[in-house]
Amino acid sequence: MTLLLMAAGSGTRYGKLKQFDDLGPKGEFLMEFGIYDALKNGFDHVVVITKKDQVEFVEEHLRERLPANIKLDVLAQEITDIPDGATFDIDRQKPWGTAHAVWTARKVIDGPFAVINADDFYGQSAYKNAADFIRAHRDDNTYALVGYTLRDTLSEHGSVSRGVCQVEGDNLLSVDERLKLEPDGDKVKDLDSGNTYSGEEHVSMNFWICKPSIFSKIESEFRTFLADKELGMKSELYIPKTIQEMLQAGEIKVKVVPSEGDWFGVTYSSDREKAVADLQEKTDAGKYDSPLWK
C-alpha cells in the first residue's frame, strides 16, 4: 500500500516551510509521524511530492530514517509538468494545486493509495481505518474520504480552508470547498459566503483513498483548465473537485471512513506551540518512540 504526502506548500501564513519544521520531541517533522503510523498499519511505499529544490534534502532525510524494506519516491511538483501536447503562456509562479500534486505521482503508483497533507497530524486510528478500507476494496473502483468533524479542525488563530461534505449514511454525496472558515460563537461561519455551519459537519482534511483511475481524470481536467487562460492565471486544481466530478459522473463510489482519532495542523505560526506540546504528550504516553526512528 502506498502513502502519498503532499509537501510542496509555501507556508505563506505559517511564515516558513512548515512541513519541514522540527515539531517532534527529537526534531522530527510532523509528516514523519504520519509515515510512522502508516508503516505500522502495513503501508510499504512512501511517495513525497515537494518543491524541486527540496527533493534531495527530503530524500536524504527519509532514507536515513525509514526501514530498508520501505520503497521511497520523492518527486518535484513543477509548474512545467503538464499533459503532453498541452501548452500555457501565462506568467504563473504558484503550483497548480493539490490535484496536480497527486498527478505528479502518476508514474510511480500503480495500485490503491492514500493521500495526506504533510503538515497535518491525522491520528493513529485514521491510518488503521484507511489500511482496512484499502484491503477490503483493493479490486474495485471505490474511493474513500477519511472524515473529520468541522468543529475539531478549526484554528484559534485565523480562518482555515475546509471541504464541507454532504453525507448520506457512509456515502459521500458532495464536497463544498470553503476557504475562510472561523468559529462564530457555537457555530462556524464562512467569511467568503456568509454561510453558517453547526460545526458537526464532516469535512475533508485531504486524507483520501484513491485508485490509479484518478490520474487520467486529473489529466483530462488539467487540459480543460489550461485551455482557459483566466483559470490558469489564478485558480488551482483541487482533489475534492476532481473526486466529486468522478462521483457525479457515476465513475466511482466514495465512502466516508471515520477517522476515530484526533487531528491537528499548523496553519499559522501560533499553532506551533500546541503542535509541539501535543506530540510531546503523545510520545510521553508511549504512543510514539523517541527518537521516532530507531
Image: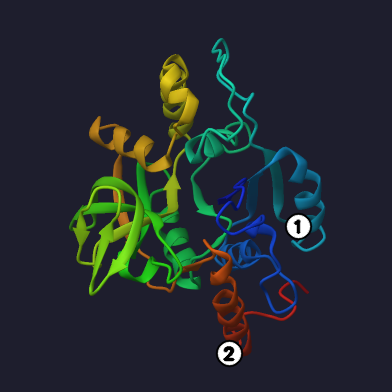
Residue depicted at x 37% and y 43%: 240
Residue depicted at x 55% and y 15%: 88
Looking at the rendered structure, the secondary structure element under dot 2 is loop
On residue 285, the disc is: 2
- Mark 2–mark 1 distance (CA, rounded to whole Å): 25 Å
Across and down, in percent, residue 248 comes to 24, 34
Q: Nearer the viewer, residue 90 or 169?
A: 90
In the displayed structure image, the side of residue 107 where residue 121 appears, left or right = left
| Three-letter code, disc 1 | Leu
Looking at the rendered structure, the secondary structure element under dot 1 is helix
In the displayed structure image, the side of residue 45 where residue 86 appears, left or right = left
Scheme of colours in the image: rainbow
On residue 62, the disc is: 1
Residue depicted at x 69% and y 64%: 21
Name the quadrant of the C terminus: bottom right
Q: Quadrant of residue 170?
A: bottom left
Task: Please tell me whether residue 95 is drawn above or below residue 228 in the rendered image.
Answer: below
Q: Is residue 141 visible?
A: no
Q: Quadrant of residue 139?
A: top left
- How many other residues sit within 10 Å of disc 1, few (<14), some (14-19) or many (≥20)? some
